[in-house]
Image: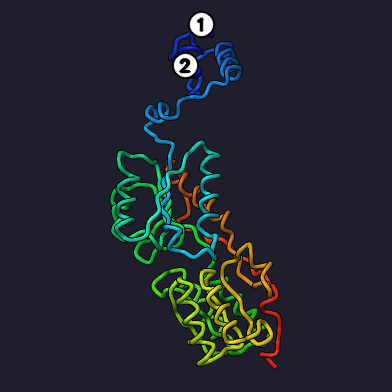
Amino acid sequence: MGITIQDIADLAKVSKGTVSRVINGAPGVGAETRKRILKLIEELDYQPNASAQGLASRRSYNIGVIIPHTGSYSMSTTYWPTLLTAITEKAASQDYNVLLSTARSEEDVDSAYRSILKGKRVDGLIVGAEQFGEKQLAKLLLKDFPFVMVGKSTAFSHYYVDVDNVGGARRMTEYLISLGHRKITMLAGPEILPSVQSRVRGFQEAMTKAQLDPGRVIYTTYQAEDAEKTALQILREDPPTALFVAAADLVLGALEAARKLKIRIPEQLALVTFDDHPFYPYLSPSITAVKQPIHELGRAAVEMLFALMAKKPVEKKEILPVEIIVRGSSQPGDAMK
């Protein structure tokens, strides 16, 4: 059995209440007594009971996170695992635990919502905006429960963190135009998603500014087979000189389509993507990508949530800049000659 408050009190020859006040930083304890108790706590490696502290302060010392089930995303993306690692590390630095729920469907989201909030098991919540349903968001708003969205919701105006999807897509498109490409097509994810809409907007802004066709956008799902099928259609029917694949989930499908059609990258087709991946530098050719600051995004979400939990003033949104990583897949080739 571990060291208890009573053990510390007996050794220090004080009451349990005095030890408790020292642990919680409360006033009413003399300097010498406080010093003696703190020394004993350090020597005996006493660890306060987090649950007991939580009951006393009406805090659980837990935050909840609801994200998509990773099985619904291809292995070509490390977005959610990386984000979750950053959230967990940042929460731990403030002595908070993370309770994770994953969801495949609207019903799963509803179940996760009920489970994670039942009995106030968490003090705040971080949710993937594109996965959390309008019904659940409305409930959280009505309850005045502190939560932060990763990504922007089209249904509600609430606190959120995100990357610069519009700016990143615009800059990548401008980069392709600067190489001499005039026939650029974007292969995008589901049109209903706000992040997809933002990336399409950035692409179209750059194309319109350059007096090029902004309508060269084809939507698909995040399944590799669908991405391959759609890319095959693009490359057969109206082949561009550059293909902007707007999510890492679609890259493998696009690469397989080019392989089947014997299209050489970058000699015959420049290929770039939004979302970097650790294996992109090691492919042949290596893949040019928009790199998202995913670790920073996770930390920013936790910082915003803690500010809301403490009822401190905070900006309603934080948009993080992205970076263009130029690699072999976009180098000038025969396609532009």
Q: Which of marks 1 and 2 precedes in the sequence?
A: 2
- 191 relative to 156, above or below: below
**Left or right of 142 on screen, residue 313:** right
* Image spot of residue 95 (x, y percent): 51, 36
**Residue at image mark 2:** 5
Instruction: Identify the residue shown where x is 46% and y is 61%.
Output: 151
Measured Cα–Cα span from mark 2 to mark 1: 12 Å
Give amino acid for label 2.
Ile
**Left or right of 283 on screen, residue 237:** left
Determine contact: label 2, label 1, CB under 8 Å: no
Q: Residue furthest top?
A: 13
* Image spot of residue 107 (x, y percent): 29, 58
Determine crowd level at label 2: few under 14, some 14-19, many 20+ residues with C-alpha closer than 10 A: some
- Asked where in the image residue 222 lies, by quadrant, the reply is bottom left
Q: Foreground residue, 303 or 99?
A: 99
SS at mark 1 in the image: loop
**Residue at image mark 1:** 13
Give amino acid for label 1.
Lys
User: Which disc is residue 190 wearing?
Assistant: none
The colour scheme used to paint the residues is rainbow
- Asked where in the image residue 320 lies, by quadrant, the reply is bottom right
Of the two numbered discs 2 and 1 in the rendering, the one whose residue sits closer to the viewer: 2
SS at mark 2 in the image: helix
Instruction: Identify the residue shown where x is 52% and y is 55%.
Output: 81
- 106 relative to 113, above or below: below
Determine crowd level at label 1: few under 14, some 14-19, many 20+ residues with C-alpha closer than 10 A: few
Instruction: Identify the residue shown where x is 50% and y is 57%.
Output: 80
* Image spot of residue 282 (x, y percent): 68, 67
* Image spot of residue 135 (x, y percent): 28, 58
Instruction: Identify the residue shown where x is 55% and y is 76%.
Output: 245
Q: Residue furthest front?
A: 260
